[in-house]
């Protein structure tokens, strides 16, 4: 919200927030805004766009309601709990011709922008392997994350969505030909996904062209640091990596690999936290309507469904 306000591209006119302390913090960032009760109060004629940051179970229905009311939408991830939910939101954006954005924020780190440029230039040769890691040693602090009906799943839909999106986006959306996965809860194979969410997962994606992607993600892992975040690309002519620094969730740097030597691609600080929302708002201010690339959100969701065996 602070990042959006700082652009000067839009006026924040209303906030729907049930928690008094959070509402006060929000209104301090947008002192001219009014506090309202619920989504319906955000769909009036004086509002052009809505930012949705509610629990995951509400994302799809709220996004569709806002789009059907003619509002552009920026939504927290995941856009839906399942691929059909995500596809329904994308279809609503297409019908309404409104700009849909999702907070897949790691795309907007300086490191991933630099790595994607290398991949587009084929500077790494044929990329045959990608390793993705996202371990959150704390895990979520909201109870609803642990109920499948509310969250849609555990660490895969919470953290893995970022990493699957990063890999497919960076590689320019190759076809995912096969998916194999293992899901665990409390150290044992996940027995009933309808009753329990996974807190550890590994998956392998086989892509068209012979690239293999390996994903690992977790909540509450004995990782020795708050977070382990990495996206590493291995090619016939070199490699590149995005990695977090000293267990940070926010400090990420990129490097290009020349066998056993690394060449820095980016440096700290890199204040990337609000860039996905600012990118959406900038395009909205320029008059953008429906973006056909929104369909890629459903592609990522279908891969997650395959990881879950849905």
Image: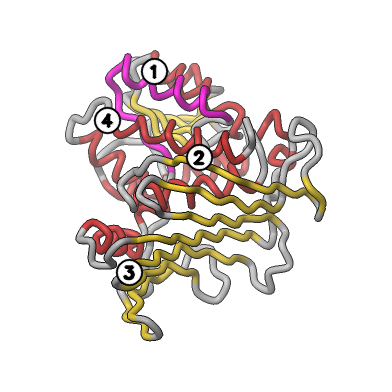
Measured in 3D between alpha carbons, the distance from the residue under mark 1 to the one under mark 3, in whole angstroms, is 42 Å
Q: Looking at the picture, does residue 72 appear above or below residue 122?
A: above
Q: Earlier in the sequence, mark 3 or mark 2?
A: 2
Horizontal side of residue 254 vs 151, given as left or right:
left
Measured in 3D between alpha carbons, the distance from the residue under mark 1 to the one under mark 4, in whole angstroms, is 12 Å
Q: Looking at the picture, does residue 242 appear above or below residue 179?
A: below
Q: Earlier in the sequence, mark 2 or mark 4?
A: 2
Extreme residue in the front direction: 210
Identified at 45% across, 40% down, the residue is 177
Q: Quadrant of the C terminus?
A: top right
Q: Position of residue 76 (x, y in %)?
A: 49, 39
Task: Look at the numbered discs 3 and 2 and tell me whether their residues touch, using CB distance below 8 Å.
Answer: no
Q: Which residue is mark 2?
A: 77
Q: Position of residue 137 (x, y in %)?
A: 68, 62
Magenta region, main secondary structure: helix
Q: Which residue is mark 3?
A: 236
Measured in 3D between alpha carbons, the distance from the residue under mark 2 to the one under mark 1, in whole angstroms, is 17 Å
Residue range in magenta is 82-103
Q: Which residue is mark 4?
A: 291
């Amino acid at each position: 919200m602070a990042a959006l306000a700082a652009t000067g591209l839009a006026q924040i006119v209303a906030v729907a927030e049930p928690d008094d302390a959070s509402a006060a913090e929000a209104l301090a960032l947008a002192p001219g805004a009014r506090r309202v009760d619920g989504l319906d109060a955000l769909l009036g004629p004086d509002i052009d766009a809505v930012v949705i940051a509610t629990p995951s179970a509400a994302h799809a229905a709220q996004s569709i309601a806002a789009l059907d009311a003619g509002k552009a939408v920026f939504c927290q991830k995941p856009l839906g709990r399942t691929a059909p939910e995500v596809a329904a939101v994308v279809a609503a954006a297409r019908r309404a011709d409104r700009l849909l954005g999702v907070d897949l924020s790691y795309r907007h780190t300086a490191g991933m922008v630099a790595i994607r440029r290398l991949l587009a230039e084929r500077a790494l040769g044929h990329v045959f392997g990608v390793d993705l890691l996202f371990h959150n040693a704390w895990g979520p602090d909201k109870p609803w994350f642990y109920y499948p009906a509310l969250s849609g799943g555990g660490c895969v839909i919470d953290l893995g969505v970022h990493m699957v999106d990063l890999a497919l986006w960076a590689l320019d959306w190759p076809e995912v030909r096969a998916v194999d996965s293992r899901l665990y809860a409390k150290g044992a194979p996940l027995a009933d996904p309808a009753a329990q969410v996974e807190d550890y997962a590994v998956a392998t994606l086989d892509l068209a062209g012979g690239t293999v992607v390996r994903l690992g993600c977790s909540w509450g892992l004995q990782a020795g640091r708050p977070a382990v975040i990495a996206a590493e690309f291995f090619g016939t002519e070199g490699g590149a990596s995005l990695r977090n620094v000293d267990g940070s969730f926010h400090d990420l740097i990129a490097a290009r690999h020349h066998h056993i030597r690394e060449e820095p691609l980016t440096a700290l600080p890199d204040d990337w936290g609000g860039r996905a929302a600012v990118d959406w708002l900038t395009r909205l201010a320029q008059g953008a309507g429906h973006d056909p690339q929104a369909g890629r959100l459903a592609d990522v969701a279908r891969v997650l469904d395959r990881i879950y065996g849905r």
